[in-house]
Amino acid sequence: MVRKGSGARGGGGSKAPVQTVQPTPPTGKAAVPVLDFLKRLGLFKEVKLPGWALFLYGLFVLIPDVKSRIDFWWDASQYLGGNVAAIGSGLTSPLSGIILMVVGVVYVVLVDEPKRPVFRQAWLRVAGWFTFGMIFLAVFAVTLISYVAQEIGPRRIYPIQGNIVRDILASAGFVGNYSVGITYVGTCYDCDGYAGDFVDLIKSVHGWTVVSGGTVLGPSHDLISPLGVAVLDKHPSTPSPATVVMDKALKAAQIPFDLLEARSFGNRNSSDTEIIISARRVRR
């Protein structure tokens, strides 16, 4: 008699294969919940990037502190004049900021909009990227030109720097009259022009006069600054009121200088403070 199921229970019976589930290999792109949510909104797709870039740049230009910093960085471009100055002024104009913000918002709203198929044409995307590219190239060019002019070219007192110095000197000029002696090293290639800027600037301020000027060939190393500008005072630890105001003005305008002891040089007996312009060997 053969029992039912004996073949299944016997040692010679075959066992059913066990199926295992293999893990799904990673795709290499981990989904970020926040970015995924923003992409689902349809506002941060690649085609909308030019619109957001234009909007943010226009917004930054309208922030007073940011605009003042950009103007200061691009001060050299304004001094050079011509097309560079015009482009720089246009890029930081409040009107340009408003226009770019409006253009950016319109681009974000209209481009790739399913409800408006007419705006899905390729020319609109090309126009957006072209505008963004031109703004980027203009900003890069003005920044590069300003950097070269300030760091490599001959030193000058640029318009914004001059206005800062003039305002601080003028605030003290209403209290009293101050005299400044200005001397430059004759062997320096840009010292005469830089000293001339100081002379013209100080003479334009009420209550301030330049009582001396000229050139020297070999002043003592203790009287010149490696930064290229030395403000001399008989007692640097307790400087005169004129030196205090000049110190404040040059620092506010970010003109590098050193405050040194006058000792036996120049016109310290006939001027309230003195400036010596020499070659710039280091940059602060």
Image: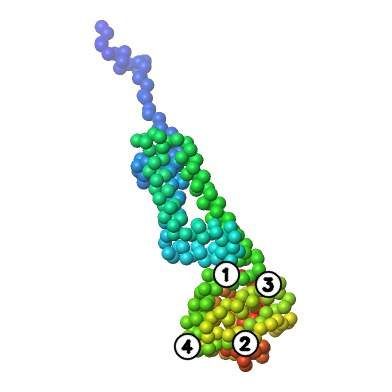
Q: Give the x, y percent position of residue 217.
A: 74, 81
Question: Image quadrant of residue 256?
Answer: bottom right
Image quadrant in which the N terminus is located: top left
Q: Position of residue 121 (x, y in %)?
A: 45, 35
Kindly check if marks 1 and 3 are in contact, taking CB atoms under 8 A apart as contact.
Answer: no
State left or right for residue 82 relative to residue 111. right
From this viewpoint, is residue 243 visible?
A: no
Residue 31 at x, y percent in the picture: 39, 41
Packing grade of label 2 (10 A; few <14, some 14-19, many >=20) is some
Instruction: Residue 158: give its label.
Output: 1
Q: Amino acid at mark 4?
A: Val
For label 4, the residue is 175
Amino acid at the residue labelled 1 = Tyr
Q: Report if the CB atoms under discs 1 and 4 are less than 8 Å apart.
A: no
Labels 2 and 1: the sequence-earlier one: 1
Instruction: Choose between 266 and 99: the one closer to the eye.
Output: 99
The answer to which of marks 4 and 3 sits earlier in the sequence is: 4
Of mark 1 and mark 3, the one earlier in the sequence is 1
Foreground label between 3 and 2: 2
Question: What is the residue that sits farthest to the bottom in this orientation?
Answer: 269
The residue wearing badge 2 is 211
Q: CA distance from mark 4 to mark 3?
A: 34 Å
For the residue labelled by badge 4, is the local secondary structure a helix, a strand or a loop? loop
Residue 146: x percent and y percent?
Answer: 58, 62
Tell me whether circle 4 and circle 3 mark residues in contact (CB < 8 Å).
no
Q: How many marks?
A: 4
Residue at 60% across, 64% down: 80
Q: Report whether residue 57 is seen.
A: yes
The residue indicated by pointer 3 is 190
Q: Nearer the viewer, mark 4 or mark 3?
A: 4
